[in-house]
Amino acid sequence: MRGLLPAVVLLALVLVLPHAAPVFHAGWPALSHPVYVRTSFAMLTLSHLGLVLVATAVATIAGLSLGVLVTRPVGRSLLPTVRAVAVIGQTFPPVAVLAIAVPLLGFGAAPTLLALALYGVLPVLGQAVAGLDNVPAAALHAADGMGYGRWRRLREIELPLAVGPIMAGVRLSAIVGVGTATIGSTVGATTLGSPIVEGLVGNNTAYVIQGALLVGALALTLDGALQALERRLTRRPRTL
């Protein structure tokens, strides 16, 4: 039930904020437009969530694939290089990534997706490597003794046993994505950063608070959903 609370709060904010002008006007009486109305909060939330989900999916596939590669004997020598490239990519601020991507991809969602995916790979990669490297040797030996091939052992033994760390990386990637996606509004993406950016530019604190409340509630909701998925995956019966 506690896992549903952030979702309930998010839904309540989406429904209540458009009608909260008296509350914000009381706090900032000088504001002529105390509630953001350029785009509905529901549309902003759905668009923001969609960007984060797509980017997290791409980052998960890329990070997990690289994690599997560098934990195999054939790719073990690539681990330092892969980690170095991923870490270097994290040193570039999101704004710089967007500035580089806009001339190539144009304004809108595309450069934002690129920035989110790049920033989301490292947490998944790091946790995938940690999880796969810490699979008990006894389980691997038992699988080999039962005649499991490399891919069957990976699919039925290693990945299920490493699902906890992997999902921790996915959750971190998604939460970072929720925060990072807000800057996508600076390049034309429709996100919850729109009221925040407009509020900062126009010195409208009410807009900033409205966007920040929704971003925080969305981050907690997504984290709760991924926690529920993690619990479901870890309860799956083992093949071995």
Image (spheres, grey):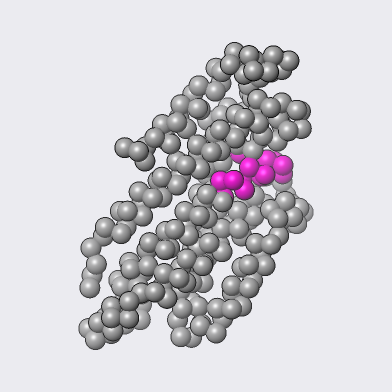
**Residue at (70%, 36%) from the top-left corner?**
197
Q: Is residue 162 left or right of residue 12?
A: left
Q: Is residue 86 visible?
A: yes
In the depicted structure, whether residue 223 falls above or below residue 37: below
Position of 86 with respect to 1 (left or right) is right
Q: Quadrant of the N terminus?
A: top left
Q: Would residue 178 be counted in the magenta stretch?
A: yes
Residue placed at 60% from the left, 58% from the top?
119
- Main SS, magenta region, reads helix
Residue 104 locus on image (x, y percent): 74, 56
> Going by the picture, which residue comes out furthest to the front?
27
- Residue in the image at 33% along x and 68% along y: 161
Q: Is residue 108 left or right of residue 57?
A: right
Q: Please give the range of residues in magenta.
A: 177-191
Decide if residue 148 is in sight here.
no
Location of residue 190 with respect to 149 vertically, above or below: above
Name the residue: 56% across, 38% down.
215
